[in-house]
Image (cartoon, rainbow, N blue to C red):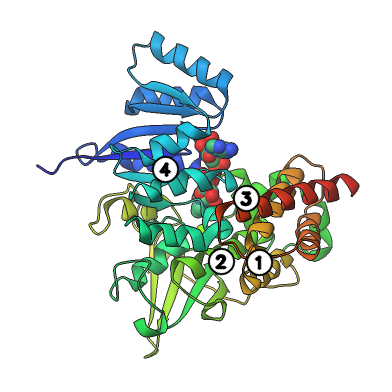
Amino acid sequence: MIPRQAVTVLGATGSIGVSTLDVLARHRDRYSVFALTAHRQWQSLAEQCLEHRPRYAVMGDPGEAQALREVLSLKGSSTEVLQGEEALRYVAGHDETDIVMAAIVGAAGLLPALAAVEGGKKVLLANKEALVMAGGLFTRAVRDHGATLLPIDSEHNAIFQCLQNERADCQAGELAQRGVRRIMLTASGGPFRTRPLSELSQVTPEEACAHPNWSMGQKISVDSATMMNKGLEFIEACWLFNARPEQVEVVVHPQSVIHSLVEYTDGSVLAQMGNPDMRTPIAHALAWPERIESGVASLDLIATARLDFCEPDYQRFPCLSLARQAAETGGTAPALLNAANEIAVAAFLARRIRFDQIALVIERVLERLPVNEPDALDVVQNADLEARTLAQTLIDAL
Ligand code: NAD
Ligand code: MG
């Protein structure tokens, strides 16, 4: 019998975390749960701990950690409750964990994901912001520590699957040497693809979070509505697949059935298709290079009937242009972009700024702050902090 692999799920109570536990629960013979983490919502984490019986649970907030500890001990659970950032790194890099799902949202996920990489784990990366902020340092750490990095973002997982005949590793050589002409990243266009431009200043957080094809956390839902999500994914693709910005193209595909494509030098184009359900990429990465059941229904091509494609509208979605520019500038520009975006999205969700002001805040931060060489983590962290502070000041003045 093959020994079970122990899995840590960082961000277990989020959209990706819940889908991950759904897949894991279908394969208790293959996987055990080593640790589950959440920022707040101790009640959700308590339920998950009682069902999946991890060795550790980590809460962000000390008060909530205490509440979780009390309820678990009352129920006779043997899960040990830890608290804080150090504990996140501890469970992510722990000797007894084999696989780490990095599904914390935003910059907060960087250090725990890096701890998993430094522990040489099989790292399933949903937290795209980690690569956007510190792609160079992150991918170097993957090589130095012999970690295995597998993309969970549906587009990048699709690209990885389309590249797999060539080389079974995200880190393998130059794209051109692998016979690849270009990568085509598909985008749904989000909920505002066809909304009259004049109405975009008035849209609400509820409308922005109502994605036509995917059910996701609030931050990524707003990113999808501004298409910053595709911008972050553009940068993510460059790092994951060793691609130059001109080798990655964004194609709008409203049905979200083709998750991305790879074109080879001979003109062959490979696409990965499936229902828009994150359990497919999660199951793919968990079992890679094998395949396991994910719970996702078969794709009904007849019901899908048509697949449409068009060019992205850069005027409607200025965030996509800003991200492309940041990718071309390089250095700490993507870290500045990411941090300004996190602050602006939070302000939009709190109804402090309008939807169209998200791009404005990011643009001003990028204009005003210097770009440095991100050769050490503290350079990236300083850029992140500076951009957050400036974005907040700009928002307060709006
Ligand atoms: P979510 O908001 O639903 O969940 C986020 C999780 O992170 C929660 O468990 C939360 O408790 C935890 N968390 C939040 N802030 C934290 C902090 N400061 N410290 C520690 N933990 C914290 O988000 P999601 O939609 O599951 O997305 C998670 C990541 O996956 C994001 O980076 C997102 O871009 C990426 N992703 C999500 C989807 C999707 O379908 N939801 C698809 C592709 C990529
Ligand atoms: Mg995606």
Q: Which residue is mark 2?
A: 235
| Secondary structure of the residue carrying numbered label 3 | helix
For the residues labelled 3 and 2, the Cα–Cα distance comes to 18 Å
- Amino acid on which the number 2 mark rests in the picture: Ile
Sequence-earlier tag: 4 or 3: 4
The outermost residue toward the top is: 74
Q: Neighbour class for label 2 at 10 Å: few (<14), some, many (≥20)?
A: many
Q: Looking at the image, tell me whether mark 4 or mark 1 is earlier in sequence order.
A: 4
Question: How many angstroms separate mark 4 from mark 3 (CA)?
Answer: 30 Å
The disc placed on residue 19 is 4
Residue visible at 32% across and 57% down in the picture: 146
Q: Residue furthest left?
A: 1
| Disc nearer the start of the sequence (2/4) | 4
Q: Is mark 4 within 8 Å of ligand 1?
A: yes
Q: Are marks 1 and 2 in contact (CB under 8 Å)?
A: yes
Foreground mark, 4 or 1, reads 1
Instruction: Find disc 3 in the rendering and name its residue.
Output: 381
The amino acid marked with disc number 4 is Ser
Secondary element under disc 2, as helix, strand or loop, is: helix
